[in-house]
Image (cartoon, rainbow, N blue to C red):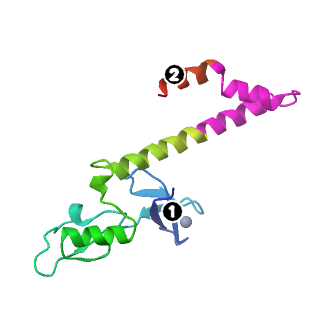
Amino acid sequence: MPIYDFLCSAGCGKFEDLVPWTQDSQPCPVCSQPAKKQVSAPLRTATLWGDTSFGINGHFDQGLQCRVTSYADTDRKLAARGLVRESDLGGDMYVERKMDAALLERTQHKAMVAEYTTNLKKFDGCENAKGLALAETFPAHKMLAESDTTP
Ligand SMILES: [Zn+2]
């Protein structure tokens, strides 16, 4: 779920990464120099982007990247692209909350993989090293506790 474009300050070019929406830079995966988050227009309609009045000629919708002349026109153009208003998705900051949740999940996944890798080294040479490492990384009491909190 890569979301933001970043541009490396050392000239390696652009890359995408999933980061919290408040984060403005990210180390370049090639050279580790800071890369700046690029301005992008995710699926966001004009309601959060300045002038939202339609007037005689409508206004330019930053999210749709085209001119819209009324709410009905906006809805038609959204529907034609298979999009919905962010306000229809679950309120303010929906996209940001989803992205932060996805980032947290990825971070937790990386931590589990790192713990498993460490445990695998610990049992190196044992006949059932993988099984022992899995049992150490995902002990039954921990899994049961997690399943209790999941509806
Ligand atoms: Zn770079």
Question: Residue 114 location in percent, x, y?
Answer: 65, 38
Taking depth in this image into account, of 104 and 70 the one nearest to the observer is 70
Extreme residue in the top direction: 141
Sequence order check, earlier mark of 2 and 1: 1
User: Does the magenta-highlighted stretch encompass residue 132?
Assistant: yes
Taking depth in this image into account, of 26 and 1 the one nearest to the observer is 1
Q: Which residues are magenta?
A: 111-140
Question: Residue 67 location in percent, x, y?
Answer: 25, 78
Determine the residue positioned at 51% across, 62% down: 16
Residue behind label 2 places its C-beta within 8 angstroms of ligand 1: no
Q: Is residue 115 above or below residue 40?
A: above
Can you tell which mark lies on residue 16? Answer: 1
Question: Residue 55 location in percent, x, y?
Answer: 10, 76
Amino acid type of the residue that numbered disc 2 sits on in the rendered structure: Asp
Circle 1 SS class: strand
Question: Residue 122 location in percent, x, y?
Answer: 77, 28
User: Does the magenta-highlighted stretch encompass residue 12?
Assistant: no
Determine the residue positioned at 46% across, 59% down: 3
Circle 2 SS class: helix
Taking depth in this image into account, of 30 and 52 the one nearest to the observer is 52
Q: Is residue 25 above or below residue 61?
A: above
Amino acid type of the residue that numbered disc 1 sits on in the rendered structure: Glu
Name the residue beneath numbered marker 2: 148
